[in-house]
Image (cartoon, helix red, strand yellow):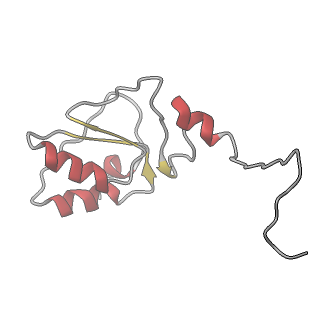
Amino acid sequence: DMTICKQEVFGMLMSILSFTSEEEVISRANNTEFGLAAGVFTRDIQRGHRVVGNLQAGVTWINNYNLAPMNLPWGGVKYSGIGRENGTGGVESWTQLKSVYVEMGNVECDYPK
């Protein structure tokens, strides 16, 4: 219930909290209105993937934090924003996909006239 764990804090800060199970830590991490980024440090890479797969955050890291290559999408979930910046995900968040089929000759039709 600590404010620092429920608010979106910008700056050089890290919260280190003990936990007894993955379910507990995932529940605590997701118990916020925000979801910009999250990092997991672990020796067990499978556990890291399991945990970040269940975190409600737009950007996640395993055994690192705050790397943001320009070709990878960046953005949050919940009140941390909608859409993505950077990479093709950023372009796609500002566009709308539309299909247009054009026939320039006679249209073959199997249906009776």
Q: Choose top left, top right, bottom left or bottom right for residue 23.
A: bottom left
Number of marks? 0
Q: Is residue 47 above or below residue 27?
A: above
Lateral position of residue 106 relative to residue 48, left or right: right
Task: Name the residue nearer the viewer: 110 or 56.
Answer: 110
Q: Choose top left, top right, bottom left or bottom right for residue 26.
A: bottom left
Q: Quadrant of the C terminus?
A: bottom right
Instruction: Name the residue at 17% across, 39% down.
Output: 41
Q: Is residue 12 above or below residue 60?
A: above
Instruction: Name the residue at 27% across, 62% down.
Output: 27
Task: Name the residue nearer the viewer: 6 or 74.
Answer: 74
Lateral position of residue 10 relative to residue 64, left or right: right
From the top left corner, tell me how far across and down residue 111 is, in percent. Answer: 81, 73
Instruction: Name the residue at 55% across, 46% down.
Output: 81
Instruction: Name the residue at 82% across, 59% down.
Output: 108
As drawn, which residue projects farthest toward the top?
70
From the top left corner, tell me how far across and down residue 21 is, in percent. Answer: 12, 60
From the top left corner, tell me how far across and down residue 91 is, in percent. Answer: 61, 34
Asked whether residue 22 is in view, the answer is yes
